[in-house]
Amino acid sequence: MEEKSPDAKQLDARKAVMRVVGRLKPIHLTIALILLVGLAMAVGNREFLSLYNINTILTFGAILLIAALGQMFAILIGGIDLSVGGTISLISVMFVFLVHSVGYWAYPLCLATGLAIGYLNGVILTRVKIPSFIATLGTGGIITSLAYLVSPRPIDAPPEDYGYFDIVNGSLLGIGNVFIFGLVTFILLLTFLRVTRTGRNIYYVGSNIKMAWMSGTDIVETRNVAFVLCGVCAALVGIVISGVRYGGDPVVGTSYILNSIAAVVVGGTALTGGVGGVVSVLFGTLFLSLLDNGMNVVGIDQYFQQAILGAMVIFGVAVTFDRSKTPIVK
Amino acid sequence: METTVFRAENVVLALEGVTRRFPGVTALNRVDLEIRKNEILGLVGENGAGKSVLTKIMIGIYPPDEGRVLLNGREVVLKGTSDASQKGIGAVFQDGSLIPNLSVTENLFLCHENGFLQFGTLSRRKMAAEARRLLAQMNIDIDVDLPVASLTPAAKQMVEVARVLWLSEKYGASNPIVILDEPTTVLNDSERDTLFDILKKLKSRTSIIFISHRLQEVLENCDRIVVLKDGQNVTDMPTKGVEISEVEKLMVGHEFSGDRFREVEQAAPRESVVFKVEQIGKVGAFEPLSFEVHEGEIVSLVGLVGSGKEQLCRCIAGLDKYDSGSVIVDGKAPLNGSSSSAVHNGVGHVPIERRVEGLALNLTVADNINYLVLDKLKRAGVISSRMEKEHAEKWVAECLVKTPSIKSACGGLSGGNQQKVILSKWLSSDVRLLILDHPTRGVDIGAKDEVYRLIRKFAKSGVAMIVMCDTLEEDIGLANRLLVMRDRRLIGELDASAGRKPSPQELIKLIV
Amino acid sequence: MKQVESIADASPVHKLGPGAAGEVAKRWFSRSGTVAQIISLAIVIAIFAVGTQGKNLSWANVQVVLSLAAIPAILAVGLHLTIVIGGIDLSIQGTVALCAVFVGLLSRSRFTTNDVGLWILPISIAIGTVCGLFTGILHTKLRIPSFIATLGISWVLYGVAVYINRAMIIGLLDHRIQNFINDKPLGIANVALVALVIAIIVQFFEDRTRAGRYLYAIGGDEALAHQLGVKVDRIKILAFAIAGCLYGLGAVLLVNRLGSATSRAGLNLLFPVITAIAVGGVALTGGIGGAKNALLGTLILTVLNNGMVLMAVNPYAQTAVNGVVLIVAVALTLDRKKLGFIK
């Protein structure tokens, strides 16, 4: 409406560039990248298309998908969860001990722990009113230290307990159970977001929390639910990892912080909230999984891979961040 | 010939033929204005008359589309607020332009500290001394080391005035002009007296433009008064001997053609009372008051900014807590201060800032329209996308929302269409009382008419409404009844049935 | 001073403000002062004096505490600048890792013939500063929120660091810096004195230079500061650059104190440093704080951890305690009005 100051004009120009780049919706970019990377790998390395390799990609992908779907909820409502690493680590060691003492009850107990952690994160955000990135930084630290308290070192399950882990390790109709877990989680969460009121509320709250509040939505409950789901997904990841390795490790979760955020952001879900969804996260995860596998096959150092992921997150955020929501970027 | 020369010498700032347009509206239309040395000039006008646009042009936020600005006889092009302040023109707005955690001294000299440098670092002693000198010159005593956040609004205003004066001194502007935008709204009586005391003293070295809607104050304290109406300067006269009623008459009294507000469709409200507030009050915002609204009735809340009407609506909508009294909707009492309780009991709120508070801009039109009724669009316990689609399409058609598809993002719609989406959202739910906060602000003419049509239609179907409009004409035109608030009290009620509408002049007497 | 130098007559002097809120606000803003922190410090010392039966008050222990607190204090003084402007810097781990790796690469050791001797100090500082500059530019020009920009950069830098270093642990053979750190010519370990001097310099910068005051203006109201003419982007980049510079210094000192350079030097720094800053009274919302706050906060936290060690508290429980302290400290200092709806 008003004539713009030189700064605003510069911003407009920048926006126009971003719009061109951003019109290639991140999800299209991701699909293109998947095809590209897949093709490159297939051409470059004979083993890439082997059944074993594809199975590895799918297994890693399924586990990452569950973690990423959880993180997606935190990001959809406009926050972030930096404690997932701690939760995954804690559950992975807790599970080993619980299986030993209470058998199959370990499964629901670990999921319940994830729920409790998620709820704690939610409450710190909604009641104590601390921004999620610092709240989850804090809780993540606490939970990681709890993981160390439970077991300072990686721990293997005694062979007599192996039976309990086979829910994770078995297969159904030739497809690994891990993959099925991932698929089922995906479908459940997709349904939740599409057809339940609370699922829809997550989008409304993420898109415009003030409007949601003024329209009568319980924004406290909605945000708590989002973080609870994130915690439960992280717990599930911990269980699955534990099952696959027949043991736990107090540091196993750390890489999932970056990976889950990267999968969500690269797939096109904006950190500002209200945009994106399970399908975007699926593609983001697929891309990351391919990239991870490809980089390993090619021989890129694991830590350098981390650097590449970090750069991708920055790029992804730069493109998807909705700057009209916050004129000042802090 | 001589008078012209005399006048020219006496004029500090002159606007000649200044016109400024925005999409859809001409905010200022060939305005001529003079600000003379050593005077306090009062600037009055209704909301939307152009006062704030005029101020912004004077301080350089944007240039006029036509016409010119002359400072001390020479034409100038102001390239922004810094440029304007260096030329001696500054404004003090209601929100305040002070950084809360910095001290008075730091705020006074922010970004202009180069005179206080000692070996590249700031001399706090020199700055504090200079700050004290400035304030003492205005006969004010404020502790300059205090963070600004701890000052009263009165003190903050004075700090800002001091800043304007200092900048003009520093950059050698000979005739500073200080523009005060509604300074008295946040002051109590004694602070107001102090303010006018100070202004009268300042007159000897500054010109002051005093913008206010409190005509009594303006006539008592200003030397001259300028009345803006519909973007034009309709009068420019000394205040001596002028009656308030004269000014009022000049401020309002537009001829409005035809049935702008669809008065023919105005129906009498039904018998039953659907909404009631009893002795509802909020300390510091509004005194205990009571009123009722009937089914299908449109009640317009009129009053100046600061009369308490905005806070009253917020309390009714559950966005703020009230301190006493009760709210009753259809016999039920929603929880105090709970917006979800208010909504569940049938109170809706169409906010003034539709982009920020009314819509989820990146979600679709369908998402926004269906927001409140998703629970009803379920089949077998889950939301049915077919029912969503039908519901959205029905309301898009009913409210004439122009959108490429129900799946388009709301952010891409025009202001008018966005407003229609918000109205559809509320009207498709079981809202019993809908609060409309400036429903046609930022909406173009064609869409305004459609909004009025919708308002009339839903009033007929029984929805009760409380509206606050941009102009008195709109308030009068839409309402069945007018409630007048002034100085935080409900002071009167006027019947506004179709065919027996009061005139804006009658209304403004009560408001001001 | 009520001296009326008015041009006109002797008219009444009007006393204005502070309002009723004034006194409360004065106290609140004097959180930027350090009264509360000094009291907290005294309380914590007292609690552990009882708990450890006075062992924590022995001169030897005090030395240990000061020595331990020094390097985190330097890092905290750096990081707090990014918080004062209303952002945050999560890149400290990555930056320190990268600098540490370069120390390993360029100092005399079994693995390399490189030996830049004492030049490693300015080199590390330079690397840190460049990282900070880069981060600042990324945040301001690409308009990415600082928490994700710095988080992403941390991963990038850490990855690069490990890639260069290949997880080796490089023992340093040149002990000059290490000796300097631990020597006590003035009765207290040199490194503690260095930390004190740095805090004083940075505090002076914040109080007495224009750029320093602009940091606080931005933290107080960025949009308004911009409107009033503050070059916001430039000042923000400066804040990140100074932070990076101090991370570089801290990295060199850290590596030399440990005696070996490894990319893992950066681990487990973020948490305690941010906690220390929050405990010191620096508000996450910006505009409040100072180097003295960061310094005191670090001291309080170190005393707390030292006390727990003396009382043989499980080390992992200590981390948990730190986590709780972080959340509580942030909760107390946050200015919720600024944040509107918190996400």
Image (cartoon, coloured by chain):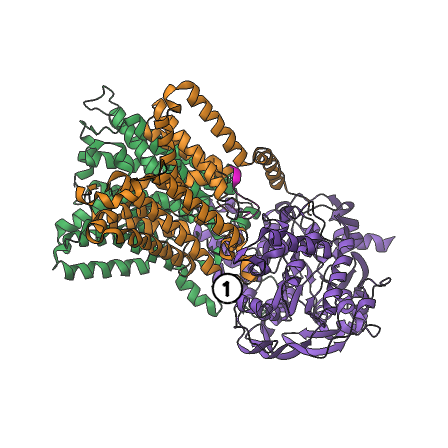
**Secondary element type, mark 1:** loop
| Residues in magenta, as a range | A319-330
For the residue carrying disc 1, how many other residues have a C-alpha within 10 Å: few (<14), some (14-19), or many (20+)?
Answer: many
Q: Quadrant of residue B237?
A: bottom right
Chain A, hue in figure? orange
Q: Is residue B73 visible?
A: no
Percent across and percent down for residue B140 are 54, 65
Q: Is residue A323 covered in magenta?
A: yes
Image position of B94 (left or right of C313): right
Q: How many marks?
A: 1
Percent across and percent down for residue B279 are 59, 81
Q: Is residue A280 covered in magenta?
A: no
Q: Which chain does purple denote in the image?
A: B
Give the residue drawn at x 63%, y 51%: B389
Q: Which chain does green denote in the image?
A: C
According to the picture, the residue beneath numbered tag 1 turns out to be: B151
